[in-house]
Image: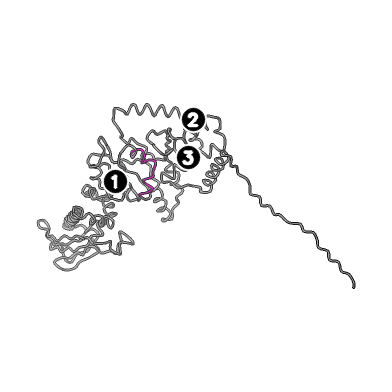
Amino acid sequence: MKYSHFVLEGQVECKAILYVPGMLPFELSKDMFDENARNIRLYVKRVFINDKFEDLMPRWLKFVRGVVDSDDLPLNVGREILQKSKVLSIINRRLVRKSLDMFREIMDDEDDSQYIMFWNNFGKYLKVGVVEDDRNRKDLLPLLRFFSSKSEDEYVSLDDYIENMKEGQKAIYYVTGDGKEKAAMSPAAEKVVGRGYEVLYMVEPLDEITIESIREYKEFDILDVTKEQDLKLGDDDKDEEKKKKKEELTKEFSDVIEYLEGTLSGKVNKVTVSDLLTTSPAALVQGAYGVSPTMQRYMKAQSVAAGGDDQGLNSMNQAVMEINPNHPIVKDLERMVKSGEKDSEETKNFATLLYDVAGMTSGYDVDDAGEFAKRVMALMTTKARDDGAGVQDAVIEEKTEEQDPVIEVKTDE
């Protein structure tokens, strides 16, 4: 796809050629950090030394192939001594810099499909580089690509996002989910999408780890809309007005909040009123230091794979439930609570179903599918009864026909 042939002169002299393969090497398709993968061959004065040298290139550049020939390294030396060599450290920095130059050349190519192909094959390595390589993180950030609420099937860079920002926007927003479709249907995304802001989609655990390693980009804070935090929406002058309005809504729906917190005890940390939700009745969000449902599933899988117990993870991150005071479902629940029906099983099922739907659309799994199905059927039965259809047991009647007996009379002749 791209190669770079160069000579280093000065403190260290060496010749090298690096290239980016056109597709992911087979051995890395099974394990992206396969220890047996040999990507850089080291020569000293044209004598082959080693091709499994971990310190020659960082592991996030495992996919880059190449050859390095140095005249400054000793021939008869062990790996331990080479690892402490300043010469090797200098070569390492230059190889990383040249690799980044190649990536930028691919990105700047007139044919955009070249970089899309590169990102689809090796994008996950660049994300790991952002997490692990503090020295080169700033150079890696412009190379990152994500889907967004406005890009459809096209990738968006952080620079593209900033260029397309709405006037007065103060932050970069993102939402997590298992895939682009689920991230798009997250109720938490409504908070900003409904106001015309673009939202980046983090569709796999590595995306979330990567974006959390970046506090800000070009003076813009990077904020997770699924976290309970100030999203910096609107004008500062209206903050007090919004705060006052939220306090009024909280007071108005205090009975509903109290009922939900009691009914959903052990499932949610608390219930709050949100004036940012638009079409969804409720949403589940995490605290400022919480972990998204996608990351929770990933952590559980890792724990189980390591032979550990995943039970502790279930209670570690109880979500915060936000309700939409303008939604008909929430208003109906308010009517049921205030009319003295809050002790009924129907009201309890209604409130629990509201939590279930909010959890599913926010990316969480339903804990008990059987109980969820019962609550849905109970609601459907109530609706059918209200419509006058009723629910009747099917009765199968067997009808038998009685036939007169046939009498045969025999006569002697």
Q: Estimate the x, y position of residue 320 in percent, counting from the top left.
A: 42, 38
Residue most extreme to the right? 412
Q: Estimate the x, y position of residue 193 in percent, counting from the top left.
A: 33, 40
Would residue 38 be found to the left or right of residue 338 on screen? left
Quarter of the C terminus within the rendering: bottom right
Q: Earlier in the sequence, mark 1 or mark 2?
A: 1
Q: Which residue is mark 3?
A: 354
Q: Which residue is mark 1?
A: 213
Residue most extreme to the front? 413
Q: Which residue is mark 2?
A: 255
Q: Residue at x 52, y 29 (%)?
A: 338
Residues at discs 3 and 2 in contact (Cβ within 8 Å): no
Q: Estimate the x, y position of residue 138 in percent, counting from the top left.
A: 22, 47
Q: Give 79 or 99, whichever is nearer the viewer.
A: 99
Classify 29 as above or below 242. Answer: below
Disc 1 residue type? Ser
Classify 186 as above or below 58. Answer: above
Under circle 2, the secondary element is helix
Disc 2 residue type? Asp
Under circle 3, the secondary element is helix
* Span of residues in magenta: 180-192
Q: Earlier in the sequence, mark 1 or mark 3?
A: 1
Label 3 Cα crowd, 10 Å radius (few <14 / some 14-19 / many 20+): some
